[in-house]
Image: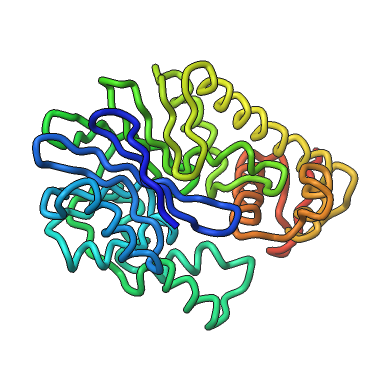
Amino acid sequence: MSEIKQLTENIHLLCFDFTEQIRSHLYLIHDQNEAVLIDAHIGLAAEKVLETVEEIIPLDHLKTVILTHGHMDHIGACPLIEEKTDASIAIHIADAQYIEEPWTQFLTLYQDIGTTEQAYQDFIALAGGRGVKVTKPLHDGDTIKAGSVELQVLHTPGHSPGSICIYEPKTKTMFTGDALIPSEWYPTTIGVFQDATKYIQSLKRLQELEIDTLCPGHEPIRQGSDVQKEFKVHIDRYYEIESKILQILAVSEGMTLWEIFYELANRLLSPGDHEPGIGAVVTLRGFLNKLCFEGKIIQENGSMWRVARN
């Protein structure tokens, strides 16, 4: 199912079902016969993505697809867009490999969950079936225009190495992709980011900016005072996770990643919501890597972690 909402004169929100519980947000920014699409949903819905865009603009007006990051649920329509339009495919250079060679993303995300042939086929279907050449590599500080609308690129790594946010200064609108997942997800997931150190740095950078409207890759949109409230929830959650990992390891002589995960889930998540999803496990590994680097914990024999003791 898809839905279109007009946010401003130049910005439309395109909503698509991803799972029964999760909706994906795409944003179409258009002016003077030029348009930019932020994110591209999943490959299984590629035709529907293009049909929905065509309800708003002619396809030949689509000049650029900006990908907030390279994860499969944000890039999937790109192969079809490449076939049907002349639009440039733009993504931060640090995530370019994820879309050009999707198997590299699969190995990164599934290293702890397990890599089966069926899991790979399901993943590739979500990612659009094949890799796509990046025609506009992005860097922090770049600008992209749709007519008179100027969009500014901010590199906000953490969720992925090349995660970016897109700022439209006229309306003070920030498109965040998954740099911030909905805080409503926190009862059922620990978090969703790969690099804990860079994630908190990116959150604090965004928190300092003047933002009136926060448009994430998944609902809901935040406005006004709710924007800063959302940043606070995420920052508080970050330090809560870190604190609880250290508390868990402080009373153990060593634990595996999975033992830490289930104990952390018992302390953070709603009863029964302890399934080891990709995002939660990647997040935990990101924290373990950070704490090891800081010398607060030690990894032994490649699979056990314990608190560092003098």
Q: Identify the residue at image location x=40%, y=48%.
A: 3
- Colouring used for the render: rainbow
Give left or right: position of 171 versus 124. Answer: left
1 up-or-down from 196: above or below: below
Q: Residue furthest bottom?
A: 117
- The spot of residue 280 in percent (x, y) is 64, 52
Give left or right: position of 139 versus 176. Answer: left
Whether residue 121 appears in this view of the structure is: yes
Can you say which quadrant of the picture contains the C terminus?
top right
- The spot of residue 187 in percent (x, y) is 72, 43
155 up-or-down from 169: above or below: below
Can you say which quadrant of the picture contains the N terminus?
bottom left
Answer with the quarter of the image where residue 184 lies.
top right
Whether residue 161 appears in this view of the structure is: no
Q: Identify the residue at image location x=55%, y=52%.
A: 22
Give left or right: position of 179 versus 142. Answer: right
- The spot of residue 266 in percent (x, y) is 83, 48
172 up-or-down from 161: above or below: above
Q: Residue furthest right?
A: 251
Q: In terms of depth relative to the viewer, which is nearer, 240 or 222?
A: 222
Answer with the quarter of the image where residue 42 lies.
bottom left
Q: Identify the residue at image location x=82%, y=43%.
A: 267
Q: Identify the residue at image location x=42%, y=48%.
A: 15
